[in-house]
Amino acid sequence: MTGATSEPEILADVARILSDFQGREYSGPIGRETRFFADLGLASIDAVVLGEVLQEHYGRPLPFGDLMAELGKRADRDLSIGELADFLARNL
Amino acid sequence: MPKLKVNGLTLHVQQAGEGPDVILIHGVTGDLSIWFLCRAMTELAATHRVTAFDLRGHGYSDVPPTGYTSADHAADVLALMDEIGASRAKLVGHSFGAVVAMHAAVLAPERVDAIVLSDPYFPALRHLEDLSRWNHWQAFHQEAADAGVNLSGEHWYDLGKFFDQVNHLDGERLLRFRQAVGLPGLNRLLKLAGTTAGDDSKVEAGLTTDLILGVRQPVLALYGDGSPFLSTAEYLVEHLPNCRSVLIPNAQHRAPEENPEAFTAALKAWIESLDEAGVAAEGVSR
């Protein structure tokens, strides 16, 4: 994977990975507003595992520890797919 | 995801950093993500090799039908240390994970350099606490009732009874409970509820008061300042040979979630003070 990865490409990557994540088939469309926990029904342990999958996919370490800690400070503990894509775009 | 074979079970393990070993142990019904959400994983990894794992029955680890006492989990911790090549480690546990950490120190004192106890009560020391005043439980009781699970006052602390009810939810009540905890959360809880974990977490399993009080390693009792278990914290400071306490402001039983910044700052400061004092290098003299 080369460095120049555009945000729409990242969003498409994330949507594809989540559509069959850990055997969980999510049939609805996944967009920027889709929420990781409230909409996809995933939990924080799934976010840890997704972080690994994404690091493998992009072939480099990413500061997921920072993203998880940011999540830990939020009252609703939720994250939109758009926020995840922004995080990836900043760090790829 | 990284998985290791431990005591015949496959456990989900996450590692970060290099240096002396720290093992992080979550509580019953939790998983290793707690250590990411409170940033402990990242912060401790600056100076240590940090290993977090999902307890058997939890997260992405195997779910055997039985074997959930603190003795069973402590045996997993020691076998995990074998597997990752850690001859000795500092153990950090939250809630029942802290009971597991203490039990591991009792089973293999020469392999445990120091112990952080985050808000546990011990089955052997249950008499110290007036558990009916546990606000966290009261809130949980209400959440469970709203979701269709009724827990009697008599069995309020009884995770076995709770799991029993979860196992028998049907129709409308199951739907409400599923909405309250989320589908993967419900699936994990149902798997755990089919095991002996609820009842096993209430028994001493050999971790008697005498053995607890025989632990000579440095111990940090890290409790929420509104914890329901402050009597246990006071008792440990008074009776253990080498124990001090730190209270986390604005926290009850779940300081890593309720005040993650203060929790992790206190944890890191204590771990680093041990390193400066040479605890890891010299071990515990006895």
Image (cartoon, coloured by chain):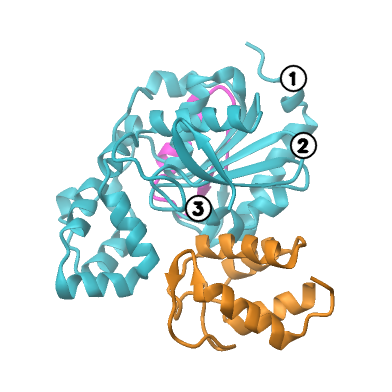
Chain colours: A orange, B cyan
Residues in magenta?
A: B222-246
- Tell me the residue at 19%/69% (across/down): B148
Does label 1 lie on the same chain as label 2?
Answer: yes
Rendered location of residue A63, percent (x, y): 73, 64
Report how far apart the C-alphas of labels 2 and 1 lie in the structure.
15 Å
Q: Amino acid at mark 2?
A: Gly
- Is label 3 in a helix, a strand or a loop? loop
Question: Which corner quadrant of the image does residue B196 belong to?
Answer: top left
How packed is label 1: few (under 14 Cα within 10 Å), some, or many (20 or more)? Answer: few
**Front residue of this view, candidates B121 and A15:** A15
Report how far apart the C-alphas of labels 2 and 3 lie in the structure.
32 Å
Q: Which sits earlier in the primary sequence, circle 2 or circle 1?
A: 2
- Rendered image: mark on residue B282: 1
- Is label 2 in a helix, a strand or a loop? loop
B53 in relation to A2, above or below: above
Q: Quadrant of the C terminus of chain A?
A: bottom right
B199 in relation to A46, above or below: above
Q: Which residue is mark 3?
A: B225
**Front position among marks 3 and 1:** 1
Rendered location of residue B244, percent (x, y): 59, 35
B240 falls in the magenta region: yes
**Front position among marks 2 and 3:** 2
